[in-house]
Every structure is written in C-alpha cells, then in structure tokens.
C-alpha cells in the first residue's frame, strides 16, 4: 500500500474508533445519571481488575478474583436490563465487529471492510463514482431501445435487451456462486454495454462486494507499470492484488489495447486465477467472437468462450439516436 493510501486508511479507522468512543462516553454518562449504582459497580470492577493484575503475579488466586469480577459484571447487566436497556448497552460498539474497526482480522488478513474501502478508493480514482450515479438500474431507460425487428437477428434490440437483462438478473441473483458463469458483452459501439456494466457494478457495490472496473487500456497500463517501473510498483500492489481478489472484475473495451506476448500472458493469468478461485469477470468488447479469437491466443480465447455467457448487443448507436 502506498504512503498516501496508508494514511487514508489509518484516518478512516481512527475516525470510526473516535466515533464509537464518543458513543460509549455518552451512553456511560447517561446511565451513570439514571442508574448511579452502575457507577459504583464500575468503580468496583476497575479496582478488582487492577488487583487481579497484581494478584496474578502471586498471592491470592486469580481465579477467585475473576469469579468476583464476573459476578459484578453480571450484576451490571441485570441492572441495565431491569431499567429497559440491552445488557450490552455499555459495551464497545463497532461499525465492523469482525475486525473491531481496525481493518485487520486476528489472523492478520485484511477484513472485508478494508477491502471494500480500498476498492471504493480505486473507484473514486477512476471516476466510477460519478459514473455510477448517472448510469444504474434506476436511470436505465428502456425507450432507447428500438422495437423494430432487426432482419439479421430476427428480434428487435428491445427484445434482445429483455433477454440480456434476464441473464444479468440471474447473474446478480446467483452472485457470487462459485460455479456460475461469467459475462461477455459483445457488439458494436454505443449499444449500452458500458451502461449495463455500470448497473451491475452499482448493485454489487451497494451489497458491499468489491468491484474493480478497468478499461482494457488502463488494465494493460497498470500491468506494464507494475512490471517495468520498479519505483512505482509498491504503490500498485493493492490495485494489482484486487485484479485477482475482487469479487467482480469488469474489463471494458477489451481489444482496444495493444496486445503483446507479455500482456496476453498476464491477461490469461488474471482470468485463469480468477476462474480457479470462482471470482466473477465481466468483459465487454466491440469485437466479434471471430475477431477475439484471432486477436488473442487460443488459450485465452477458449477460456473466455468456455466459461462466459456471450451476450450479443446490436442495433443503432445510441449516442446518435434522438428519441
Ligand atoms: N439502458 C440505457 N438507458 C439510458 N441510456 C443508455 C442506456 N444504455 C446506453 N445508454 C446511453 O447510450 C450511450 C452509449 O452507451 P454505452 O456507452 O453503454 O455503449 P457501449 O456499448 O459501451 O459503447 P462502446 O462499445 O463504444 O463502449 C451512453 O451515452 C449511455 O449513457
Ligand atoms: Mg463502452
Ligand atoms: Zn472490518
């Protein structure tokens, strides 16, 4: 993690801890006024706690003191309940009880809340935040899709979008099912592929999944910087790691990047690793299936083809249609 990001993370969790410390103080003050006996109990508990520490160094059995402490704590709980409060009313509260607002689990791994925070951060850096406010299922406008039947396809773009939406809804409903399929959006320019990707991203982010959005251009750029610019590499570790570990990786505009041996291999590595660990991928591309096949190695292509549901977008470029 780079310095700047590290500081942001620190500040985020500091703020949470301060917030909860304040909540705890306020509750305590209120309870001390309403139930003064609890203040006395707390004092007694503190005293015993200290003597417990000394005693455990020798002398009176620590076990006995622990018993007394438990008894006092139980009295406190009973009093709270008696006065209509939950028994844990004076206990510490957390935004995330899994990591107690530290960002890390006891085994040292990053907590989901930290991953989420970091992913959100990457989003803001890539302007996704603003995009998702504009493009989501609530702003999805069915009337942009023509109801005129496309002679080559046999159905209208509108009907086609209905079929696509059904697949997408299933994808979301089953998410993140291990053996479920990934999605491949393909078709001409301006047909709503990126829009629909954003809709999906928004739903999953709102459910606290980690979603990483990259155009294939920014993705390749990231991979190359990571490989060739050593001084930057450390700062890119997180972004790189999330390409593998985020719940959903969106690769938009696949095929617009310049491919070479190295990027091909890396791309395959990412796709393959994600598939093995059951992490979902959404790819969209302007290329047809044949073009994809000729652009990428057979290995990459057969991967994409086997484990993805290909969804064909067709119709007129929505950017130039006035409705
Ligand atoms: N369902 C929708 N409701 C409202 N507007 C839409 C919808 N789908 C697409 N649009 C608008 O149509 C335009 C083109 O859509 P989008 O960018 O998603 O196309 P695309 O298929 O990703 O194109 P490209 O292949 O060039 O990236 C955008 O301005 C987008 O906001
Ligand atoms: Mg697009
Ligand atoms: Zn947490």
Image (cartoon, rainbow, N blue to C red):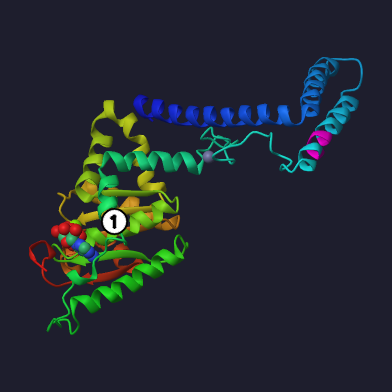
Q: How many marks?
A: 1
Q: Secondary structure at mark 1?
A: helix
Q: Out of 203 and 42, give the one closest to the viewer.
A: 42
The residue located at (23%, 47%) in the rendering is: 263
Query: How far across and down, in percent of the image, does residue 291 sit?
Result: 15, 65
- 318 on left or right of 123: left
Residue 177 visible somewhere in the drawing: yes
Q: Quadrant of residue 171?
A: bottom left
CB at mark 1 closer than 8 A to ligand 1? yes
Quadrant location of the N terminus? top left
Quadrant location of the C terminus? bottom left
User: Which residue appears farthest toward the front when viewing the image?
Assistant: 34
Give the magenta-colored segment's residue range.
Answer: 74-78
The residue located at (22%, 44%) in the rendering is: 218
Judge whether 288 appears above or below 220 on screen: below
Q: Out of 167 and 261, give the one closest to the viewer.
A: 167
Residue 77 highlighted magenta (yes or no): yes
Q: Residues within 10 Å of mark 1 (few under 14, many from 20)?
A: many
Query: How far across and down, in percent of the image, does residue 222 sit?
Result: 25, 40
Q: What residue does disc 1 label?
A: 198
Query: How far across and down, in percent of the image, does residue 88 sit?
Result: 71, 39
Query: How far across and down, in percent of the image, does residue 242 sit?
Result: 38, 44
Q: Quadrant of residue 153?
A: bottom left
The residue located at (27%, 29%) in the rendering is: 232
């Amino acid at each position: 993690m780079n310095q700047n990001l590290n500081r942001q993370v620190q500040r985020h969790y500091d703020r949470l801890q301060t917030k909860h410390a304040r909540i705890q103080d306020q509750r305590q003050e209120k309870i001390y006024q309403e139930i003064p006996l609890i203040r006395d109990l707390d004092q007694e508990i503190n005293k015993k706690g200290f003597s417990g520490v000394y005693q455990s160094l020798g002398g009176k059995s620590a076990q006995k003191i622990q018993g007394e402490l438990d008894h006092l704590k139980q009295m406190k709980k009973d009093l709270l309940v008696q006065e209509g409060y939950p028994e844990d009313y004076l206990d510490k509260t957390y935004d995330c009880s899994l990591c107690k607002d530290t960002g890390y689990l006891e085994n040292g791994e990053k907590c989901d809340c930290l991953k989420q925070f970091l992913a959100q951060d990457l989003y803001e850096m890539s302007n996704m935040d603003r995009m998702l406010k504009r493009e989501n299922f609530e702003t999805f406008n069915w009337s942009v899709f023509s109801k005129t039947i496309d002679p080559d396809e046999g159905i209208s773009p509108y009907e086609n979008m209905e079929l696509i939406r059904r697949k997408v809804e299933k994808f979301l409903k089953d998410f993140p099912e291990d053996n479920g399929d990934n999605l491949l959006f393909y078709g001409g320019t301006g047909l709503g592929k990126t829009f629909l990707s954003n809709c999906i991203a928004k739903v999953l982010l709102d459910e606290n999944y980690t979603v990483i959005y990259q155009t294939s251009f920014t993705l390749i750029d990231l991979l190359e910087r990571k490989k060739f610019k050593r001084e930057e590499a450390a700062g890119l570790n997180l972004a790189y790691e999330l390409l593998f570990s985020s719940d959903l990786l969106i690769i938009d505009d696949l095929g617009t990047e310049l491919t070479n041996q190295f990027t091909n291999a890396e791309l395959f590595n990412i796709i393959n690793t994600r598939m093995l660990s059951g992490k979902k991928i959404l790819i969209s591309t302007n290329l047809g299936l044949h073009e994809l096949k000729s652009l990428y190695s057979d290995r990459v292509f057969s991967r994409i083809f086997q484990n993805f549901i290909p969804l064909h977008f067709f119709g007129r470029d929505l950017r130039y249609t006035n409705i």
